[in-house]
């Protein structure tokens, strides 16, 4: 079945550095990918919609200069957390919808990336 | 194997009818989340349940987590076309490997269509 991968699965960085997280659709093309953030024991919160070939759409309250999204190809979207601070520590998950014939649409989730900023 | 089973996979109801979607796990759930997704859009958070027997409501949508914390049901009363979409349950499931002790896992979703 369709698979979405994320890299890295976990990362620890120093405050002030930038971290790039990759999201790949492995056997299907995704013109759209979604980035979510999950705080401990809380729900996923949609951060932004990544669109191939155009600018990402950010949800209200998400700093676009802080969380840079680049959807360079039909199988790859990247999220860069710039000048990371401890409050950016979180679990970041991407997902990609895969449209099947007959109009069905299934969302495939990556395994997530746990970011810890020291 | 699928750790979270959702049923039914799809559902077509007449406007005004009630419906229920179930989410079942063989393991204890430490946090159960319900989301809704409209075609081409990201997930929208509906509710989170943590305690056995807990029940929450949001407008005409009610979700409950059973006492054993292994099954949750989402109930929609007097459905409307605006309720149409894909409903996903997600849960924090305890694992022994990976980046942390808990991993967010999703069901496959239930596609709901509401006929006017």
Image (tube, coloured by chain):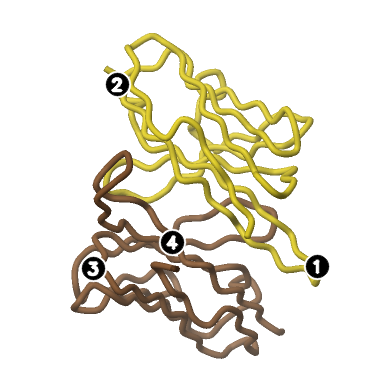
Callout 3–callout 4 Cβ contact below 8 Å: no
How many residues crowd mark 1 within 10 Å: few (<14), some (14–19), many (20+)? Answer: few
**Chain of the residue displaying label 4:** B
The residue mark sitting in front, 2 or 4, is: 2
Q: Position of residue B111 (x, y in %)?
A: 61, 74
Vertical placement of residue A89 versus B35, above or below:
above
Locate residue A14 relative to residue B85 in the image: left or right: left
- Asked which secondary structure carries label 3, the reply is loop
Which chain shows up in yellow? A
Residue placed most toward the observer, B106 or B19: B106
Q: CA distance from mark 2 to mark 1?
A: 44 Å
- Asked which secondary structure carries label 1, the reply is helix
Q: CA distance from mark 3 to mark 1?
A: 36 Å
Mark 2 or 1 closer to N-term?
2
Locate residue A30 relative to residue B36 in the image: left or right: right
Q: Quadrant of the C terminus of chain B?
A: bottom right
Callout 1–callout 4 Cβ contact below 8 Å: no
Locate residue A85 relative to residue A73 in the image: left or right: left
At x 69%, y 63%, the residue is A105
Q: CA distance from mark 3 to mark 2?
A: 31 Å
The residue mark sitting in front, 3 or 2, is: 3
Vertical placement of residue B1 versus B20, above or below:
above
Q: CA distance from mark 1 to mark 4?
A: 28 Å
**Chain of the residue displaying label 2:** A
Dividing the picture into quadrants, the one containing residue A78 is top right
Tell if the residue under mark 2 belongs to the same chain as the one under mark 4. Answer: no
Which chain shows up in brown? B
Vertical placement of residue A92 versus A110, above or below:
above
Dividing the picture into quadrants, the one containing residue B67 is bottom left
- The label number, if any, that marks residue B46 in the structure image: 4
Residue for badge 2: A86
The residue mark sitting in front, 1 or 4, is: 1
């Amino acid at each position: 079945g369709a698979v979405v991968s994320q890299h890295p699965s976990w990362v620890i960085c120093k405050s002030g550095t930038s971290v790039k997280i990759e999201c790949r659709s492995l056997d299907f093309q995704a013109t759209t990918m979604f980035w979510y953030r999950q705080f401990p024991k809380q729900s996923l919160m949609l951060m932004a919609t990544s669109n191939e070939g155009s600018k990402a759409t950010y949800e209200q309250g998400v700093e676009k200069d802080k969380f840079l999204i680049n959807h360079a190809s039909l199988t790859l979207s990247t999220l860069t957390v710039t000048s990371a601070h401890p409050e950016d520590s979180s679990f970041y998950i991407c997902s990609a919808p895969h449209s099947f014939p007959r109009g069905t649409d299934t969302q495939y989730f990556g395994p997530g990336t746990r970011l810890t900023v020291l | 194997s699928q750790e979270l089973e959702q049923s039914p996979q799809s559902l077509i109801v007449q406007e005004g009818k009630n419906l229920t979607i179930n989410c079942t796990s063989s393991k204890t759930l430490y946090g159960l989340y319900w989301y809704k997704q409209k075609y081409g859009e990201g997930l929208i958070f509906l509710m989170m349940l943590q305690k056995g027997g807990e029940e929450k409501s949001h407008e005409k949508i009610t979700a409950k987590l059973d006492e054993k914390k292994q099954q949750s049901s989402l109930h929609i009363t007097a459905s409307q076309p605006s309720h149409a979409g894909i409903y996903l349950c997600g849960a924090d499931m305890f694992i022994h490997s990976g980046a942390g002790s808990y991993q967010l896992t999703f069901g496959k979703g239930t596609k709901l269509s509401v006929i006017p």
